[in-house]
Amino acid sequence: MRRNLPNIISILRILLSFLTLYLLDLGRYGTTFAACILIVIIIFTDFLDGFLARTLNAESEIGAILDITGDRIVEFIFWIFFAVKGRISFWFPVIVITRDVVVDTIRSSAFKKGVKPYEMHNNKIARFIVTSGYFRTGYALSKAIAFTLLGIDLLTIHGKLSFNIHGVALAFAWISLIICIARGLPVILDAWPYLKNK
């Protein structure tokens, strides 16, 4: 049971994300507040499942697949949801989804040729951007703040918010998008020699 705990958390993260969207879509104070708490929990579980997998020595291929799948589903549905609601440009989900699909495809192809994801970065700056805990944490936090503020901002649509936080929410959305692109570019550039020559 303990060895399956990280996988259970990954699955729970996916289920909670859909519940969160439902609560946000209701447009009420109570459900929006609950949804914002769930967003923080969802982002936290992204760290938790990986930590538990390493701590419990429960790392596995299925666990890695569930973790990546959970990350992508959560990220995609929130970006798409807020774009549909008109709180961000449709280009946000388009860019994020394109970046993630390209990066995941490259890493999968490189892995088949015996190159692990982080082994392809010979440049120290590129390796720092892609693997650094600072960038990974910054990306997670910027998404958590952006999604939470965008969720609260939805109340303005229903006339239930007396102050406007859309500008702040959009600023964090941009920060998240910039970090997303910055962490993806080194993968694309550094992987090319491996994919071309091996």
Image (tube, rainbow, N blue to C red):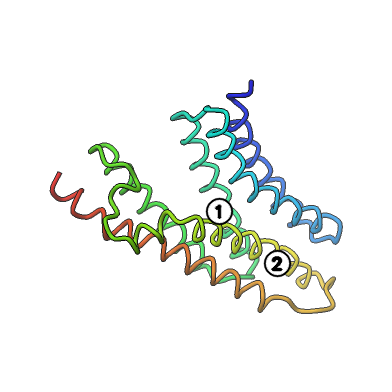
Q: Where is residue 14 drawn, in percent x and y?
A: 61, 41
Distance of mark 2 from mark 1, alpha carbons? 15 Å
Q: Where is residue 80 drawn, in percent x and y?
A: 57, 59
Q: Image quadrant for the C terminus?
A: top left
Pick whichever of labels 2 and 1 is earlier in the sequence. Answer: 1
Mark 2: few/some/many CA within 10 Å (<14, 14-19, 20+): many
User: In the shown orientation, is residue 123 left or right of residue 104?
Assistant: left
User: In the shown orientation, is residue 151 left or right of residue 126?
Assistant: right
Residue type pointed to by label 1: Glu
Dot 2 falls on a residue whose secondary structure is: helix
Q: Where is residue 131 drawn, in percent x and y?
A: 42, 53
Residue pictured at 33% horizontal, 56% vertical: 187
Residue sitting at the far top? 1
**Residue 179 vs residue 90, the one in the foreground:** 179
Residue pictured at 41% horizontal, 65% vertical: 182
Dot 1 falls on a residue whose secondary structure is: helix
* 2 and 1 marks in contact (CB < 8 Å): no
**Residue 2 vs residue 11, the one in the foreground:** 2
Q: Which residue does the numbered mark 2 point to in the structure image?
A: 149
Q: Quadrant of residue 31?
A: bottom right
Residue pictured at 54% horizontal, 47% vertical: 73
Image position of 150 with respect to 22: above or below? below
Q: Which residue does the numbered mark 1 point to in the structure image?
A: 75
Image position of 22 with respect to 15: above or below? below
Image position of 154 with respect to 58: above or below? below
How many numbered marks have been drawn onto this rendered protein structure? 2
Mark 1: few/some/many CA within 10 Å (<14, 14-19, 20+): some
Q: Quadrant of residue 140?
A: bottom right
Q: Image quadrant for the N terminus?
A: top right
Residue pictured at 62% horizontal, 58% vertical: 81
Residue type pointed to by label 2: Leu
User: In the shown orientation, is residue 151 left or right of residue 82?
Assistant: right
